[in-house]
Image (cartoon, rainbow, N blue to C red):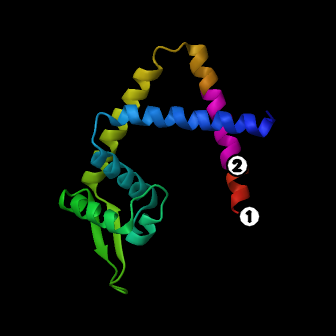
Amino acid sequence: MDRMGDLLKLLEKNHEIMDNLAKQMSVSYSKHEHRVFHILEELNKNGKIRLKDLANIHEMPSASSLCVTLGQMEKEGLVVREIDAQDRRNTYYSISQKGQTHADEVMNLARKHFIKLFSPLSEEEIKTIQEAIAVVNEIFENRLLKQGDK
């Protein structure tokens, strides 16, 4: 197979492995909890954001489904909802302090899972993985993703 075909096979295999790792990590919390964490993660990264912009983020549920979930999250005190004073059709959401604490707790569980997962590896294997991931991230961030902006 040509080198592009070989690369595609490796990327597909990596995606499958990472998907399986994510599924293993999510067994400790429900599908609802996974969705909530993903929303909190995006709110933490983006700050205050309009509902329709949040719905346009990759792997987010539809705007109507997202609205229901955000309503539940608001009742739980995880997010803050704000209606735009200039245009009442726009609703903004941001992460609350309670939401931030919850997201941090879930992230700490994920880190513990990764530590448990990688602890049987030797220092050399861990170093090899770190170096390989660093190279891949550098290439993706600095070359491939910037090309997509053109």
| Span colored in magenta | 130-141
Residue 99: x percent and y percent?
28, 52
User: What label sits on residue 150 in the rendered view?
Assistant: 1
Residue position marked by numbered label 2 in the rendering: 142
- Circle 1 Cα neighbour tier, 10 Å, few/some/many (<14 / 14–19 / ≥20): few
Q: Nearer the viewer, mark 1 or mark 2?
A: 1
> Three-letter amino acid code at disc 2?
Asn
Q: Is residue 26 above or below residue 124?
A: below
Q: Residue at x 55, y 12 (%)?
A: 122
Indicate left or right for 56 with 88 as reference: right
Which residue is at 35% across, 83% downward?
89
Q: Earlier in the sequence, mark 1 or mark 2?
A: 2
Q: Secondary structure at mark 2?
A: helix
Q: Residue 95, image x and y in percent?
A: 33, 58
Residue 130 occupies which quadrant of the picture?
top right
Quadrant of the drawing holding the C terminus: bottom right
Look at 38% across and 31% down and name the residue there.
24
Q: Amino acid at mark 1?
A: Lys
Q: Nearer the viewer, residue 97 or 143?
A: 143
What secondary structure is found at the residue carrying circle 1? Answer: loop
Which quarter of the figure has residue 13? top right
Residue 87 location (% of width, % of height): 37, 86
